[in-house]
Image: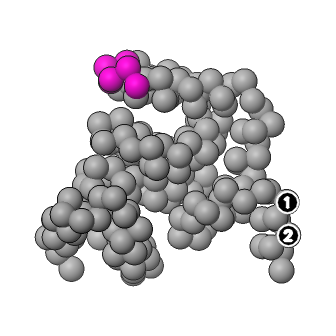
Amino acid sequence: MDIAKKLDSLEDKYYDSWEEDREKLIAELKPIHQQLSAEDPDAFREFKLRVINHFGGAYIPYIFWTELNTFMDDPVDARTYLQECMRSFANSDFGEEEQQKLKPLLITYFNMEKEFEMNKFFTLVIANMHPAVKEYFRDKSSFHEKNARGTEVYKQKFLLLRKIYPDFELFNQPLSYLKESLSK
């Protein structure tokens, strides 16, 4: 599969008619994501690095989810890719839907990341961004710092769901529901 050509082809459709209905895009990208992640780690890495710079950032939360999962097992190797996702997100169309999907993942990441690494990222990347982007990232960092209970809930939810294909509707369910339904 030529990943670059496939993404370019899908991007044409996205900007023609799918921009208002992102679910069509997600439906097209999901099988590619799942196939490459299961069969070809190198092609999956290429896919992740390319897709974060397509579709105005609409697929970034899905890639961030997979990278956050990797970060939990291997923070050193995954940090670079997580921060590249955040940089791409900061430079994207920065859509409301993507902001909502990324919010709990960012808060979870901020909770697990070393303070030095976050300070470095904020200084080198976020400080140079549009004021709305700066505010979004500061808001999520502040939430993590001031709301330990909410942050812990996000983290527990992610720990329960991290190994599945990103499912933001499921992630939005109450923690008690997730624990009960996933224990069956």
Residue at 56% x, 26% y is 139
Q: Nearer the viewer, residue 67 or 23?
A: 23
> Which quadrant of the figure has residue 113?
top right
Let me know if residue 141 is in the magenta part.
no
> Which quadrant of the figure has residue 92?
top left
Disc number placed over residue 180 in the picture, else none: 2
Point out the stretch of residues depicted in magenta. 127-132
The scheme the figure's colours follow is one colour
Residue 13 percent coordinates (x, y):
20, 68
Residue 93 percent coordinates (x, y):
30, 42
Q: Is residue 128 above or below residue 113?
A: above
Circle 2: element type: helix
Residue 159 percent coordinates (x, y):
70, 57
Quarter of the picture holding the C terminus: bottom right
> Which quadrant of the figure has residue 91?
top left
Q: Amino acid at mark 1?
A: Ser
Q: Is residue 45 visible?
A: no
Disc number placed over residue 75 in the picture, else none: none
Q: Is residue 68 visible?
A: yes
Residue to which mark 1 is pinned: 176
Circles 1 and 2 in contact, beta carbons < 8 Å: yes
Name the chief secondary structure element in magenta: helix
Residue at 38% x, 57% y is 59
Horizontal side of 70 relative to 146 (left or right) equals left
Circle 1: element type: helix
Residue at 59% x, 35% y is 110
Quarter of the picture holding the N terminus: bottom left
Q: Callout 1 environment at 10 Å: few (<14), some (14 to 19), or many (20+)? A: few
Horizontal side of 155 relative to 122 (left or right) equals right
Q: Amino acid at mark 2?
A: Glu
Give the distance between the C-alpha atoms of the residues marked 1 and 2, in whole angstroms.
6 Å
Horizontal side of 175 relative to 130 (left or right) equals right
